[in-house]
Image (spheres, grey):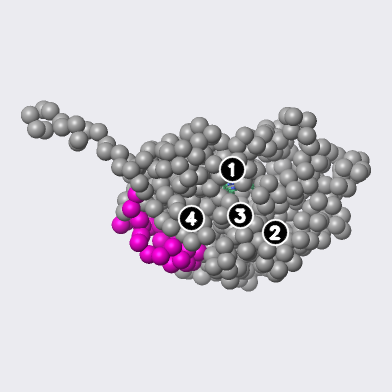
Amino acid sequence: MLGGTVPYFLTSRTIRSGLPPGPQMASTLQAVAWARRPLPFLERCQKHFGDTFTIRVKHAGTWVILADPEDVKKVFTADHAVLGVGLANSILGPLLGPRSVMLLEEPEHVRRRKLMLPPFHGERMKGYSEMMADVTRREMSGWPIGQPFELWPRMQEITLEAIMRVVFGPVETDRLRRLRHLLRKLTNWMNDPRRLNLLAAAGPARFAGNSDYREMMDPVEDAVLEEVRRRQRDPGCTDGTDIAAMLGEAYYEDGSPMTEQDLRDELVTLLTDGPTSSLLSWSFERLLRHPEKYARLRAEVKAGQDEAYLDAVVKETMRLCPAAPIVVRKLLAPMELGGYMIPAGTTVAPCVHLVHRREDIYPEPLRFRPERFLEQPAGTYTWIPFGGGVRRCLAASYAQLLMKQVMSTVVSEVELRPADPRSERARKSAIAFVPHRHARVIAKRRLKEDRR
Ligand code: HEM
C-alpha cells in the first residue's frame, strides 16, 4: 500500500446518482427479450454490466436488477413503508386481480397477510401430508407403463387437486369438478406462449380486457364466489376448516368483512399455484439425469427415517430452476444499491436466477448437486426462491411439504427414466419456468414389491 495510507477515494465506495447502466436497446426490444428468453437476457446483461444493471421493459417499466446478496439483503430488510408493490404491471396483475395480497400496498398488505397465514402454518400443515400423498397415489394410478409421457401436466393435476382440497375441503361436488375443469382450461390458455407474446405487446391493462381472456376468467370468478357464498348461506356444508369458509367469515382488525373483490382475488391467487408443479417437474427432470442421486433419494425414502437428502434435492431444484427469476419492489424513497442512489419510484428486482448462480456462493453453479445443501445451510439472502422480507411467499412451507410428499410417494411407487437422453431447457409459462419438453419420462414398472 502507498506508504500504509489508503486514500479516501479507494476505501469508501463512491455513490453515484442516477440509474446503473444497462442495455441501450429500445424498451420494445427489451420487452421482447424479456418475454421470450428472460434467463439468457439477464445473464448477458450481468456479463456486460455487472451485478447491478437497469433494464427497460415496455409496459412493465424500468427495473434495476440486483444480483449482489448485500443489495438483496438491503431490500428484504428495508422498512416496508419504503417499499411498494412492483408487480402490478406483470402478467400477475390481470390474473390475480388488484385486491390480491400480492398486489396490495402497505399497511393493507400486512393486514391481509395475517388473515391468510394460518392455513399455511403450524398445526394445520401437519394435516395435509397424508392428503398430499393420497392425491399423488391416485394420480399415479393412471400413469402408463413403458410409454413416454409428460410429467408437468401430471404434476399440475396433483398440485391443483391438493390446493382445491385445502381451499374448499375434502368433499367433492359437481360444482367443484366444474371449477377444476375451468381452472385447467384457464391455466392451459395462459400457458400458451402466444398469450405471453400478446401480453408483452398489449400490456396488462389491455390484456385484462381481452374478450378471449374474459371468456376464460369470468366463469372461474363466478364459480369461486359461488362457493364462498354457499358456505356463508349454509355453514354446515363444510367442517369450517377450509380456506373458502375461513375467508368468507374473516374480519379485518377494524371489524369489516372481506369484500367480494377481495375474496375473488385472494382465492384466484391461491388456486393458480403454478410454481409448485413446475418445480416438481424440474426435480424429476434433474434427478433422472443423475441416477446415483436418484438412487440415494430412493434409498433414503425407503429407509423412512431422515428427510435430509429429500430436503436437499428440493432446495437444489429451487436453486437451479427457480420458478420466478426475479422478485420486484417499487422504491417509495431513494435507496443506495450497488453504489447508486436509486431514486424513489424505481422498481428494484432482487434477481433469484443470478444470485443462485453465483460461483462465490455455489461452486460449479450449473451442476445439479443437492449435496451442497448438506454441506452448508441455505442462506437467507443467497437462497431466495420464495423471495424475502414481509412479502416472502406465504405458502413456502406448504409448497415444500407438497414437493416432498409428491417426490417421496413417486420414487417409492414407480421407477422412472428420462424419455430422452438430452437435458431440457427452461421455457417460460404464464407463472413459472418449465422444462421445454414438459419433463418427458417413461415409467418402467411399479415398485409395489419394494415398498416399505
Ligand atoms: C415452490 C412453489 C412456490 C414458489 C417457488 C413460490 C414463489 C413465490 C415468490 C417468489 C413470491 C414473491 C415473494 C416476494 O416478492 O418476495 C411468492 C409470493 C406469494 N406466494 Fe408463492 N410460491 C410457491 C408456491 C405458492 C403456493 C402453493 C401458494 C398458495 C397456494 C403461494 C402463494 C403466494 C402468495 C399469496 C404470495 C404473496 C405473499 C405476499 O405478498 O405477502 N405460493 N411466492
> Which amino acid type is marked by label 2?
Glu
* Magenta run includes residue 45: yes
Q: Main secondary structure of the magenta part?
A: helix
Q: Earlier in the sequence, mark 2 or mark 3?
A: 3
Evaluate if marks 2 and 1 touch, with contact meaning CB atoms under 8 Å apart.
no
Distance (Cα) linking label 4 and label 1: 23 Å
Choose mark 2 or mark 1, whichever is in front: 1
Could you tell me if residue 432 is visible in this image?
A: yes
Q: Which residues are magenta?
A: 20-48
Disc sitting over residue 157 in the figure: 2
> Which amino acid type is marked by label 4?
Gly
Choose mark 1 or mark 3, whichever is in front: 3
Crowding near the residue tagged with mark 2, few <14, some 14–19, many ≥20 C-alpha atoms within 10 Å: some
Q: Is residue 136 left or right of residue 418?
A: right
Say which residue appears at 76% left-offset and 58% top-offset: 220
Evaluate if marks 3 and 4 touch, with contact meaning CB atoms under 8 Å apart.
no
Q: Earlier in the sequence, mark 3 or mark 4?
A: 4
Secondary structure at numbered mark 4: strand
| Image vertical order of residue 246 relative to residue 179, above or below | above
Q: Which residue is mark 1?
A: 393
